[in-house]
């Protein structure tokens, strides 16, 4: 069922002919090839065994529906990628990235497009999402709780994307709002009409304005893609073996471009301040150690 929606989304984007605004895609994740090998668990009706074989997946890892054919194929082969985690319990690696893409597909296609809170979504729908993910991946840490938390966020993000890219820009063009976007043709018209009406209401306008003000105060946004801080830490641990990756290093690296520069002057200034403060802290700790050492030598000489 979902793979059919995948085709609808892909075909829809081609039919646009460039006329309709499409939300920006994460190019880095689209063009990224997996440098790691994924571990798989092979399962049968009675037993499940972890395979020692690792399989390198060099196919593109784009957002959303592009993950679906691979997932469906592996489910038919009864192969489940094993999701790996770093020492802090955060998901890392190719299997984790693909699982998150799959959760996004399920959240967009199986959860009704209604103006409700996540807590109001029927439990059977949430259960269907968890079962679909559990059949496709060995989730590991976090299990059902982490999967549904991710689905909740992706569902909210999807509604936000529709609002920002397909509704608010066309408030004066009701014809544009009369049908679901070509990119998301799987959305039922009745749901779309109700969603559009809710987004054009005065109540939503007030809430949207408040959120916009909050976003303006976020001065130091990072440049990470779906890999997040956990993926960045995993990457740095590979390229900097034996070096402890502290939070200040992660903060700075998360805001650098591919050349190691921080384009935003305000963020660059803050990064310099962090480095300066760390240097002062290091000098202070070093002086404290020297002071204690001298005191110990003094008292030992007095004995």
Image: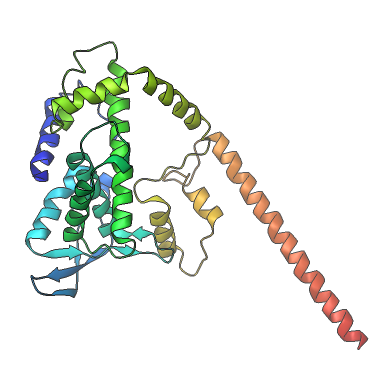
Residue closest to the eye, 59 or 139:
139
- Which image quarter is the N terminus in? top left
Q: Is 243 placed left or right of 179 in the picture? A: right
Q: Is 177 placed left or right of 292 in the picture? A: left
Q: Position of residue 59 (x, y in %)?
A: 18, 53
Tell me what residue is drawn at x 15 percent, y 54 percent: 71
Q: Position of residue 111 (x, y in %)?
A: 21, 40
Looking at the image, can residue 171 be seen? yes
Tell me what residue is drawn at x 27 percent, y 16 percent: 170
Q: Position of residue 139 (x, y in %)?
A: 26, 62
Residue that extends furthest to the right in the rendered view of this protein: 302
Tell me what residue is drawn at x 11 percent, y 39 percent: 5
Vertical placement of residue 30 versus 179, above or below: below
| Residue 17: quarter of image | top left
Please give the count of numbered marks on the rendered protein. Answer: 0
Residue closest to the eye, 186 or 238:
186
The way the protein has been coloured in the rendering is rainbow
Vertical placement of residue 280 versus 30, above or below: below
Residue that extends furthest to the bottom in the rendered view of this protein: 303
Residue closest to the eye, 270 or 90:
90
């Amino acid at each position: 069922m979902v793979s059919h929606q995948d085709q609808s989304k892909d075909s829809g984007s081609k039919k646009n002919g460039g006329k309709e605004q499409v939300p920006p895609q994460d190019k880095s994740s689209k063009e990224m090839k997996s440098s790691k090998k994924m571990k798989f668990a092979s399962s049968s009706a009675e037993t499940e065994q972890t395979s020692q074989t690792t399989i390198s997946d060099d196919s593109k890892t784009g957002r959303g529906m592009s993950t679906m054919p691979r997932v469906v194929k592996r489910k038919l082969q009864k192969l489940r990628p094993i999701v790996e985690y770093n020492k802090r319990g955060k998901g890392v690696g190719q299997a984790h990235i693909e699982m998150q893409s799959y959760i996004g597909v399920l959240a967009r296609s199986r959860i009704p497009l209604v103006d409700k809170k996540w807590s109001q979504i029927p439990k059977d729908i949430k259960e269907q999402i968890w079962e679909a993910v559990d059949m496709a991946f060995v989730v590991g840490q976090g299990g059902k709780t982490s999967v549904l938390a991710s689905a909740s966020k992706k569902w909210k993000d999807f509604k936000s994307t529709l609002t920002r890219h397909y509704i608010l820009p066309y408030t004066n063009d009701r014809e544009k709002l009369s049908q679901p976007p070509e990119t998301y043709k799987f959305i039922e018209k009745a749901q779309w009409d109700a969603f559009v009406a809710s987004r054009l209401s005065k109540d939503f306008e007030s809430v949207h304005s408040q959120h916009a003000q909050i976003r303006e105060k976020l001065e130091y946004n990072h440049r990470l893609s779906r890999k997040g801080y956990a993926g960045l830490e995993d990457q740095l641990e590979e390229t900097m073996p034996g070096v402890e990756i502290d939070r200040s290093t992660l903060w700075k690296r998360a805001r650098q471009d591919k050349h190691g520069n921080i384009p935003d002057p305000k963020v660059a200034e803050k990064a310099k301040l962090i480095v300066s403060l760390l240097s002062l802290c290091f000098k202070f700790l070093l002086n404290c150690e020297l002071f204690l050492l001298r005191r110990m030598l003094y008292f030992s000489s007095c004995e």
